Image: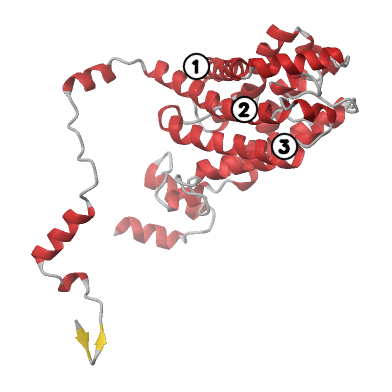
Amino acid sequence: MSEGGRSRRLESYEIEIGISEALSRHIARHVVAAKPVAQRTLNFESKRPRWLRECAAEALGVFIFVFAGLGSIAALDLNTESKLGAPVFGSYFSIAWAFALGIMFSVIICGPTSGGHFAPAITICLAIWLGFPWRKVPYFIASQLFGGFLAALLVLGMFWEEVQHVTDNALANNIPLVSARGPAAILIPIPGDNQNNLGFLLLIEFFVCSFIALAVWASIDPANPFVSPHSAPIVIGLAYGLMIIGFAPFTIATNMARDVGPRIVASMFWGMEAFTYKGYSWIAMLVNVPASIFATAIYELLLRDSLAKIGSGLAEHQDGEVGLHRHLTRTGMLEKDDAESDWRA
């Protein structure tokens, strides 16, 4: 259609109804029609225990990101030449992206079922601050540890031939199997030969885990205008990856679920030194819990704005409108006369 010799795009309301319907059919022609839900499907789903679904989702979520992360570590550490200082395939940057994307997909795939905790420290913090049932905490944590165990076992099995080759080389060169240069480092964080100051390693672990917990808490805050439910998995994954890029060379674990299961697998194949080497394992396994509680306490006590959440319609006062009016009047945000006129209206 032309106007004054120039082309002009038709507005949608100027298209005839028949043409509009034809265009709609054209656009949707490749979309698979929704299949009707059969009653037997509903019957089957209604019989699944909710606790079982949640546990399976937590285990699977941890499995996904630990499997991806350990696979990237194996790609780096199982290059025989890397033990001799030659160029290698992979880097801390690729490991960081493997964990970051793994966490992102874990939240996307399993988060709708269980809430996407994937870390004992986060489960405990949710119970402390946001009302997650304490009775669920033990079996959520057990499921998370089991997911990490299975991921480590599978990665070790998939790379077993290469692991054996690296193990033989380590024995031939008198390199301890449980050390930063040994095969156990594929599965678990181990301090380097020159890292003997546990206080230094504890400090790094504490602040790395605190940062991750802050990022998680900000991402799940419904009043945060910068993070939507759609972008939360990306933000959390990037926060995790950022800490690996910055501090992995100093040895970090970040998550009990990522550490305990693989450490058990490492002890099965290379001995209990996986738990005793340099006395480090307790830092990797436990520090993330108090660090996360510390970080989430900062967010809850200093950064949380519950009134913004109420104002955006994402929550309500526990005493309803009466309680909200009382609070606004008491804090001076609402004049007493205005409050009374509101009630009269």
Of residue 277 and residue 127, the one placed in the foreground of this image is 277
Callout in the foreground (3, 2):
2
316 left or right of 141? left
Position in image of residue 196 (x %, y %): 90, 25
Of residue 188 and residue 145, the one placed in the foreground of this image is 188
- x 8%, y 63%: residue: 18
- x 18%, y 57%: residue: 24
Image height of 239 relative to 40, above or below? below
Local SS, label 1 = helix
What is the three-letter code of the residue carrying label 2?
Gly
Picture quarter with the N terminus: bottom left
Local SS, label 3 = helix
Position in image of residue 257 (x %, y %): 61, 22
CA–CA distance in space, label 1 to label 2: 34 Å
What is the three-letter code of the residue carrying label 3?
Val
Position in image of residue 70 (x %, y %): 64, 26
User: Based on the displayed image, in which of its 4 quarters is residue 159 positioned?
Assistant: top right
What is the three-letter code of the residue carrying label 1?
Arg
CA–CA distance in space, label 1 to label 3: 29 Å
- x 49%, y 35%: residue: 105
Does the rendering let one see residue 6?
yes
Q: Which residue is mark 1?
A: 135
Q: Which residue is mark 3?
A: 208
Does the rendering let one see residue 327?
no
Mark nearer the N terminus (1 vs 3)? 1
Q: Which residue is mark 2?
A: 71
61 left or right of 189? left
Of residue 248 and residue 80, the one placed in the foreground of this image is 80
Mark nearer the N terminus (1 vs 2)? 2
Mark nearer the N terminus (3 vs 2)? 2
